[in-house]
Amino acid sequence: CHAAVNNRLCRESSNSDNAESASRTTTAANTTSKATISQKDILHLKQAAQIARIGYGNTFPNPAVGCLLVRHTHTNPDENDDDKDTVLGSGFHPKAGMPHAEIFALLQACGYVHD
């Protein structure tokens, strides 16, 4: 899971997604916006996959899942180079029967769980 905060779309990556769906169009309240996956998004997805590996082998029948909560801040709307990403929390699904990755990432973002 790659979740972004501050008016950014939440994107989830799953095995059922097609490779050609690198960009998606969403419609809400008579407005259409196109979201594309940036290099930073790909980096965050890779980080979530790396975190998921910590629980690998212990989560059956659930999949190994990693989650990264990211705040994306536009410092200069005209230039993407000035954008700043801050990781608010991360988590993984440690074992079947325990809370999933998203719960641990939210708890860390709220300050209840440390690294």
Image (cartoon, grey):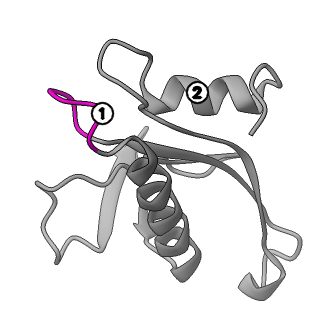
Q: Residue furthest top?
A: 97
> Label 2 amino acid?
Phe
Residue at 47% in and 32% down: 101
Neighbour tally class for label 1: few under 14, some 14-19, many 20 plus, Cα within 10 Å: some
Residue 55: give x, y in percent of width and height: 39, 41
Which quadrant does the C terminus fall into? top right
Q: Earlier in the sequence, mark 1 or mark 2?
A: 1
Secondary element type, mark 2: helix
Q: Is residue 36 visible?
A: yes
Compare residues 60 and 22 and report the one nearer the observer: 60
Q: Which contiguous range is marked in magenta?
A: 57-63
Secondary element type, mark 1: loop
Q: Is residue 88 magenta?
A: no
Left or right, residue 95 beside residue 115: left
Left or right, residue 106 beside residue 39: right
Residue 26: give x, y in percent of width and height: 34, 52
Q: Looking at the picture, does residue 12 appear above or below residue 95? A: below
Can you identify the residue that label 2 sits on?
Answer: 104
Can you identify the residue that label 1 sits on?
Answer: 58
Residue at 80% in and 66% down: 74
> Label 1 amino acid?
Asn
